[in-house]
Image (spheres, coloured by chain):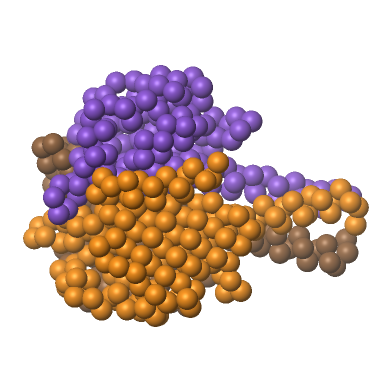
Chain colours: A purple, B orange, C brown
Amino acid sequence: MSSALEARLEALERHVRELEDRLAIYQLVATYGPGVDTCTKEVVAGLWTEDGTYSASGAGTFEGAAGVAALVDSPSHQGYVERGCGHVLSLPHVTVAGDRAVATGYSQVCVRDGDHWEVRRASANRWELVRTPEGWRVQNRSNHVLDGSEASRDLLRRGVVEAG
Amino acid sequence: MSSALEARLEALERHVRELEDRLAIYQLVATYGPGVDTCTKEVVAGLWTEDGTYSASGAGTFEGAAGVAALVDSPSHQGYVERGCGHVLSLPHVTVAGDRAVATGYSQVCVRDGDHWEVRRASANRWELVRTPEGWRVQNRSNHVLDGSEASRDLLRRGVVEAG
Amino acid sequence: MSSALEARLEALERHVRELEDRLAIYQLVATYGPGVDTCTKEVVAGLWTEDGTYSASGAGTFEGAAGVAALVDSPSHQGYVERGCGHVLSLPHVTVAGDRAVATGYSQVCVRDGDHWEVRRASANRWELVRTPEGWRVQNRSNHVLDGSEASRDLLRRGVVEAG
């Protein structure tokens, strides 16, 4: 194979892998809502690494894939599910660096309130992801309600400023 | 051409087609809101197959591309359009299997209410898609309001569990 | 290199560039919210061309990248930031034509109001983008609140009808 051809093929392969990474991360983020809104623990747990964590302001830190998935058993979550709820995650900003990635975006928890839905929680999210043999997984997700605090802004800012 | 080169090219072509499929499905989902919010029937109809359907809880089943597009004429839809509305669809979870695909996500219908917008309908959506010579089209879309019912959760769950 | 091989490589390179364009535009749109919600002017300014503009119904036209970024200093924006806010942008419809592109979608400004968040502004958005040596940049963004006006619908309609 000529070296020019080899270089073109390698560039294509690299670019395609980069696109695949981004779309895999979109897919991961888009899986979270249906997972928790249906209390399907294996789907939620499947997004995290075995020792991954999820820190949510006001709710504490959930540890391990099984620990994160268990959040669907909490009384507050069960209350939302019974009333009718949707964890709607926005199109995230994504940066990939080798085998690590960060996705930054918003989540809205819409809960039914009679004839309409109220946004009961609107948050900033930072997903710290790692590439594993089974695909991208969450090593840590940090969530902070949009309460005007510097902590909530810092979480969002890091994602888009680090990106350079 | 060497067989190694041929294999690399074929793998690239397959991966690129998979990425194109996913982005075409994102684009389709992102077209729906502007289509119905502007009552542009040809745009809405163009998303469905000729014999495609749209079942929405509380609103019945619309049959055929033209029948689906005609939903924009309904008094309830016209009322929303006059007040000011946005059918906001979330980044969907997507699985593609050959010439069929399923997209699973949320929709929020935001309707103006004085100085703010209310979410008048928040729903789970399952888009069953088929590949046609003209691109991906909706064979059936199922929509269920997030009302705490098992039907609404089942619709979401199927999308992310089938995915394996 | 055989002409058949050359044609396959060129087709792949073209398709990959098209996918990269679309994902770069998603990323740009996903950067806006974290940029303004954290008042990070360099991030906001970095999305626009030097002479780019942003016209928002009810707020006027901001001119130049620095002028657009300065909108974060406005009393109304600062008030939102202090209370806690999220500029949540939807997955956009995107059309690319050479070195120009249009992204069409929704934005919701969620502002904290006690124990929930209110959508204080729901808008239609048309992002007119240009390819620059540094990547895609906004030449003009038009935003119109979803107030039932023909202007708000026209802005949405153009994006999805032009697409053919």
- Which residue is nearer to you in this view: B126 or B89? B126
Q: Is residue A134 left or right of residue C90?
A: right
In the depicted structure, whether residue B137 falls above or below residue B6: below
In the depicted structure, whether residue C82 falls above or below residue B77: above
Q: Is residue B73 left or right of residue B112?
A: right
On the question of residue B87 being in view, the answer is yes
Image location (x, y in percent) of residue A124: 31, 36
In the depicted structure, whether residue A33 falls above or below residue C12: above
Instruction: Please tell me in which quadrant of the rendered image residue C81 appears.
Output: top left
On the question of residue C163 being in view, the answer is no
Q: Is residue B14 left or right of residue A152?
A: right
- Which residue is nearer to you in this view: A65 or A157? A65
Q: Looking at the figure, which quarter contains the C terminus of chain B?
A: top right
| Residue in the picture at 54% in, 58% down | B101
Image location (x, y in percent) of residue A105: 37, 41
Q: Is residue A76 left or right of residue A67?
A: left
| Residue in the picture at 36% in, 40% down | A38
Instruction: Please tell me in which quadrant of the rendered image residue B81 appears.
Output: bottom left
The residue furthest left is: B114
Image location (x, y in percent) of residue C22: 51, 58
Image location (x, y in percent) of residue A152: 27, 32
Q: Looking at the figure, which quarter contains the N terminus of chain B?
A: bottom right
